Image: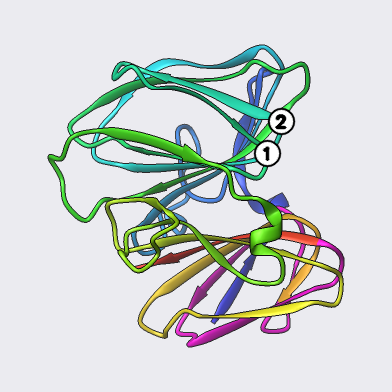
Amino acid sequence: MIELRPFSSLGGANHGWLDAHHHFSFAGYHDADRMGWGNLRVWNDDVIAPKTGFPPHPHSDMEIITYVREGAITHKDNLGNHGRTEAGDVQVMSAGTGIAHSEYNMEDVDTRIFQIWLLPTSRGESPSWGARPFPKGERAGRFVALASGYDEDGDALSIRTNARVLGATLKAGESTSYDIGADRRGYLVPAKGRVTVNEVTVDARDGAAIRDVDRITVTALEDAEVVLVDAA
């Protein structure tokens, strides 16, 4: 089954500095049918105005992945980590026993991110943060693991859960496949472009909730950038 969740159907709010859209229940948005997808709990589509951002705030026992679509995000936390993550790149924060962090758009243009939260497999571990570039050429025409809880995905950022966050860039007319497995769940969002997923058309920023499917084939109807979570 592939359930299309159009961008227009998402919850959210425009706070002026932050225009947020929620694929799953979050903050003031509640939908009993959209509480999560396997161990995927949050997928927020955020647009952050220049010179603004999220002030310091705490988290615990959550794996938080930030995929930067446009602009850049600047991270600081109480562990002393400080970094700037640019468009196409990824940062991971394992909140563990507790971490306080801020995320600011220090740029002169809007920053657009996907913020993805996954429930950890184990609790009570030390918090951590990391980031790395993922040149789009490395994922041209195929899915590449950006963050993963599996040792075999050695180049991916490590997360403490049975899941993968994957990215692919496809030229118009190009296709790629990914084996999910009917016992798992997938959630796919095109950051840019329009694609089909097993013949279901998915526009940019729409969600495709996937279950009971062994394999998906993604075909780009126009140049596309796609993010997929393979969840337990």
Residue 50 x/y as whole percent: 71, 16
Q: Is residue 97 above or below residue 134?
A: above
Name the residue: 44% across, 55% down. Answer: 156
Q: What is the C-alpha distance between the residues marked 1 and 2?
A: 6 Å
Q: Could you tell me which quadrant the C terminus lies in?
A: bottom left
Residue 94 x/y as whole percent: 31, 39
Residue under pointer 2: 71
Name the residue: 71% across, 30% down. Answer: 71
Name the mark on residue 87: 1
What is the quadrant of residue 127 in the picture? Answer: top left
Q: Tell which of 108 and 130 is nearer to you.
A: 130
Amino acid type of the residue that numbered disc 2 sits on in the rendered structure: Gly
Q: Label 1: state its secondary structure.
A: loop
Name the residue: 71% across, 18% down. Answer: 107
Amino acid type of the residue that numbered disc 1 sits on in the rendered structure: Ala
Is residue 201 in sight in this rendering? yes
Q: Tell which of 153 and 167 is nearer to you.
A: 153
Name the residue: 55% across, 64% down. Answer: 144
Q: Label 2: state its secondary structure.
A: loop
Of the residues under marks 1 and 2, which one precedes in the sequence?
2
Instruction: Please report the bounds of the magenta region as a residue range.
Output: 197-223
Left or right: residue 127 versus residue 34 is left
Q: Does the magenta stretch include residue 198?
A: yes
Q: Does the magenta stretch include residue 206?
A: yes
Q: Tell which of 114 and 149 is nearer to you.
A: 149
What is the quadrant of residue 174 in the picture? Answer: bottom right
Left or right: residue 109 versus residue 51 is right
Is residue 6 in sight in this rendering? no
Name the mark on residue 28: none
Q: In this view, does 35 lie above or below 222?
A: above
Q: Tell which of 212 and 180 is nearer to you.
A: 180
